[in-house]
Image: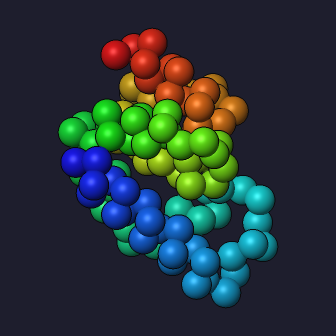
C-alpha cells in the first residue's frame, strides 16, 4: 500500500507543478482538485491510513506534499472521525498516532 500512496502523491505533486495556476495560492485546499490522483488516494480508504502516516513521519519535510497527505488521511477518516485542529502534517500524524 505504501508504494501506491507514494505513486499517488507523486502524481498529485507532478500535476500541481504542471498546472498553470500553481503557485498562485498558499492555501493547500486550492490544490486538491488539480489532480485526480488526490481523489484516488482518498478512495484507497482505511488501508491507506498507515501508509499515509508513515510517509509523513519518514519525510524530512513538512510542506505541501505532507500537508496534502494529511488532508487525504483526514478525508479517509470521514466527517465524524477526522481531526479538526492541526497546523501541519506532523501535527496530524501525532493526532492519528494518539488514536491508533
> Going by the picture, which residue comes out furthest to the top?
98
Q: Position of residue 50 (x, y in %)?
A: 31, 33
Residue 30: image quadrant is bottom right
Identify the residue at image location x=61%, y=78%: 17
Q: Position of residue 36 (x, y in %)?
A: 39, 71
The answer to whether 57 is drawn above or below residue 63 in the figure is above
Q: Is residue 75 left or right of residue 66?
A: left
Judging depth in this view, the residue of 18 and 55 nearest the camera is: 55
The answer to whether 24 is drawn above or below residue 48 in the figure is below
Residue 8: image quadrant is bottom left
The answer to whether 69 is drawn above or below residue 14 in the figure is above
- Location of the C terminus by quadrant is top left
Q: Position of residue 48 (x, y in %)?
A: 28, 42
Colour pattern = rainbow
Q: Is residue 23 left or right of residue 41?
A: right
The answer to whether 37 is drawn above or below residue 75 in the figure is below
Can residue 7 be spotted in the picture?
Answer: yes
Q: Position of residue 11 (x, y in %)?
A: 42, 71
Q: How many labels sit on residues?
A: 0
Identify the residue at image location x=58%, y=46%: 67
Q: Is residue 69 left or right of residue 37?
A: right
Identify the residue at image location x=60%, y=42%: 60
Identify the residue at image location x=44%, y=65%: 10
Can residue 74 be spotted in the picture?
Answer: no
Amino acid at each position: 500500500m505504501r508504494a501506491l500512496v507514494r505513486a499517488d502523491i507523486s502524481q498529485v505533486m507532478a500535476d500541481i507543478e504542471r498546472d498553470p495556476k500553481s503557485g498562485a495560492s498558499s492555501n493547500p485546499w486550492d490544490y486538491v482538485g488539480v489532480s485526480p490522483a488526490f481523489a484516488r488516494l482518498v478512495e484507497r480508504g482505511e488501508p491507506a491510513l498507515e501508509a499515509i502516516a508513515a510517509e509523513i513521519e519518514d519525510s524530512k519535510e513538512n510542506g505541501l506534499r505532507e500537508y496534502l497527505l494529511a488532508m487525504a488521511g483526514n478525508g479517509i477518516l470521514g466527517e465524524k472521525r477526522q481531526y479538526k485542529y492541526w497546523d501541519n502534517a506532523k501535527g496530524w500524524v501525532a493526532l492519528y498516532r494518539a488514536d491508533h
